[in-house]
């Protein structure tokens, strides 16, 4: 998967669905967690990678109002959406492996659930190290195994039931495919970082219904493209929502989600 290929996964209509159905349930709890960690670091110049629709960006602006925040994403649609959502940051389209910034200009680089998408993580981490000032830090998180994420595991079960011959493997191989903390730490070391902190964090996600979570994943993430190849999107969506409801329950749903948080220093 190249950076260009990853960019094409995200169509212009997806950020709004992602923001409405996935951000509150899946991403905001961890954005709050990372924002609190940023406060303790007291940075003056922050670069955010893979900022998406700006859920963490908004948290950074609120938690560290004195910091200058530059938010980036590879996808132009996400940058446009995020700039409208969190206008207090400077927004730029940027590839994490070729950052358009001079050496040593940031105190902190932060990334929420983006490193799994980097085609060459060591190269991206080396770029992060390049743009950090001496003493700078790199704070990011990555999802744990698929089984430790209640919503994603239920979704994958629904996909396997709805499409038994060819269930999409995106969740297992990309978002949850970088779930070995030892491998993450080794990649950081290869890029010249010292691992200052490594922590497992489990938070609870909440949503009005399992069907809304299903819609968020199926219409607001790259899973959408895989489902569309099978033709009857509505039927797949109904089947997946049914499986997720059976697993998570009717009405408001909640479930644990596990991630690993890393803090690297130069």
Image (tube, rainbow, N blue to C red):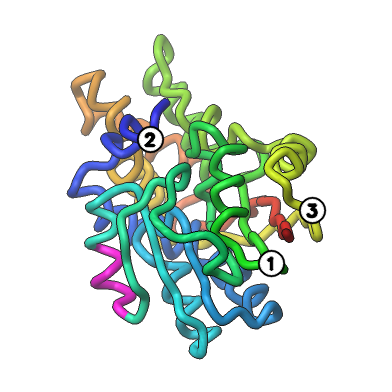
Disc 1 element:
strand
Tag 1: Cα neighbours inside 10 Å, few (<14), some, or many (≥20)? some
Asked whether 85 falls inside the magenta stretch, the response is: yes
Question: In this picture, is 115 found above or below 119?
Answer: below
Tag 3: Cα neighbours inside 10 Å, few (<14), some, or many (≥20)? some
* Outermost top residue: 165
Q: Decide which of tag 1 and tag 2 comes sooner along the chain.
A: 2
- Image depth: mark 1 or mark 3 in front: 1
Percent across and percent down for residue 216 are 35, 49
Q: Give the range drawn in magenta.
A: 81-87
Question: Residue 134 got which mark?
Answer: 1
Instruction: Name the residue beneath numbered marker 2.
Output: 3
Asked whether 247 falls inside the magenta stretch, the response is: no
Residue 108 shown left or right of residue 190 in the figure: left
In front of the other: 147 or 40: 40
Instruction: Name the residue beneath numbered marker 3.
Output: 194
Q: Decide which of tag 3 and tag 2 comes sooner along the chain.
A: 2
Q: Which residue is drawn at 64% across and 61% down?
A: 139
Total marks in image: 3
Q: Decide which of tag 1 and tag 3 comes sooner along the chain.
A: 1
């Amino acid at each position: 998967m190249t950076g260009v290929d990853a960019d094409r996964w995200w169509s212009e209509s997806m950020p709004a669905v992602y923001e409405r159905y996935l951000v509150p349930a899946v991403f905001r709890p961890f954005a709050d967690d990372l924002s609190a960690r940023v406060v303790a670091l007291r940075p003056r110049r922050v670069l955010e990678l893979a900022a998406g629709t700006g859920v963490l960006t908004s948290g950074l602006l609120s938690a560290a109002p004195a910091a200058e925040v530059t938010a980036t994403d590879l996808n132009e649609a996400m940058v446009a959406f995020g700039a409208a959502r969190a206008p207090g940051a400077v927004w730029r389209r940027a590839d994490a492996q070729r950052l358009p910034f001079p050496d040593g200009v940031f105190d902190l680089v932060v990334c929420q659930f983006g490193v799994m998408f980097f085609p060459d993580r060591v190269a991206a981490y080396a770029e992060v190290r390049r743009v950090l000032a001496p003493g700078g830090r790199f704070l990011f998180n990555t999802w744990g195994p698929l089984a430790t994420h209640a919503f994603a595991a239920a979704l994958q079960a629904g996909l396997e039931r709805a499409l038994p011959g060819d269930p999409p493997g995106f969740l297992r191989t990309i978002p949850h495919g970088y779930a070995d903390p030892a491998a993450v730490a080794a990649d950081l070391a290869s890029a010249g970082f010292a691992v200052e902190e490594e922590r497992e964090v489990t938070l609870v996600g909440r949503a009005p219904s399992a069907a809304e979570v299903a819609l968020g994943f199926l219409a607001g993430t790259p899973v959408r493209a895989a489902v569309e190849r099978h033709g009857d999107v509505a039927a797949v969506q109904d089947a997946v929502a049914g499986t997720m409801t059976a697993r998570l329950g009717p009405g408001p749903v909640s479930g644990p989600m596990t991630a690993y948080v890393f803090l690297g220093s130069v």
